[in-house]
Image (cartoon, rainbow, N blue to C red):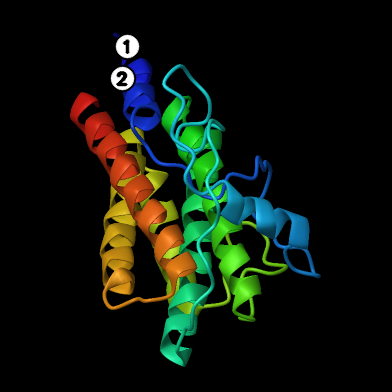
Amino acid sequence: MTRNRRIATILTVGVLAVGGVAAAGPVIADSGGTPASAAHQGMHRMSEPANRHGGHGDDAPCTRTAPAGQGTLTAARKDTLAGMAEEEKLAHDLYTAFAERYDVRIFDRIAAAETRHLTAVRTLLDRYDVSDPTTGQPAGEFADPAVQATYDRLLKQGEGSLDAALKAGRTVETDDVAALTKALSGLTAPDARQVYTHLLAASERHLAAFEHGIADA
């Protein structure tokens, strides 16, 4: 089995769906925010299982379940949610940059997944009336200076070699797993728990894919 196929298998088998709107292209919000229909779809397809025979990795459309109900978020929880949007955009923009530089499928596949993840997070931002910090931000640009610094550092790291890019991806997913685990602690809002739980499962799968790629490098 080739290296790309092994990595693709990690991405496609047993991964839960997140924000199943089939989006493509740059992760840049419209000035008017997420359309209501897209927001509804993003929550409606949160629990679709992965396609074992191909597709985009972690949100192949199969079955549908109803979105969880809305709860209550504290101001601190809303800040965390806004930060999740920036983290998903960081991952998407970084992997897209690496996909353009290196001829391996892993970055394209995971970047596509991050697009759908951001759609799901934007659905929550809309539901809880939280300002989207990614609105109008071009690829590679972020509202939070700390996120910008992290992106710039990881982009520079990954430009050195494919192995370095894979390790940058591992860093992103490791940080996301930690952030999502912390965000889920004590969280009671059903819809936010639903989204974060699926984001966590996806990040764990992406982390495994990067680890496998590094081992094969």
x then y, percent, for residue 157: 36, 51
Corner quadrant of residue 2 = top left
Residue 35 shows in the view: no
Apparent side of residue 80 relative to residue 100 in the rendered image (left or right): left
Disc 1 element: loop
CA–CA distance in space, label 2 to label 1: 6 Å
Q: Nearer the viewer, mark 2 or mark 1?
A: 2
Disc 2 element: helix
User: Can you identify the residue that label 1 sits on?
Assistant: 2
User: Can you identify the residue that label 2 sits on?
Assistant: 6
The N terminus, quarter of image = top left
Corner quadrant of residue 106 = top left
Apparent side of residue 140 relative to residue 17 in the rendered image (left or right): right
Q: Nearer the viewer, residue 74 or 158?
A: 74
x then y, percent, for residue 177: 29, 58
User: Compared to 193, does 79 lie above or below?
Assistant: below
Residue 201 shows in the view: yes
x then y, percent, for residue 189: 43, 75
x then y, percent, for residue 195: 46, 59
Name the residue: 43% across, 76% down: 146
The C terminus, quarter of image = top left
- Picture disc at residue 135: none
Q: Nearer the viewer, residue 160 or 53?
A: 53
Q: Nearer the viewer, residue 71 or 32?
A: 71
Name the residue: 30% across, 35% down: 209
Q: Amino acid at mark 2?
A: Arg
Q: Amino acid at mark 1?
A: Thr
Apparent side of residue 176 relative to residue 132 in the rendered image (left or right): left
Q: Nearer the viewer, residue 125 or 162?
A: 125
Circles 2 and 1: CB distance less than 8 Å? yes
Mark 2 neighbour class, 10 Å CA radius: few under 14, some 14 to 19, many 20 or more: some
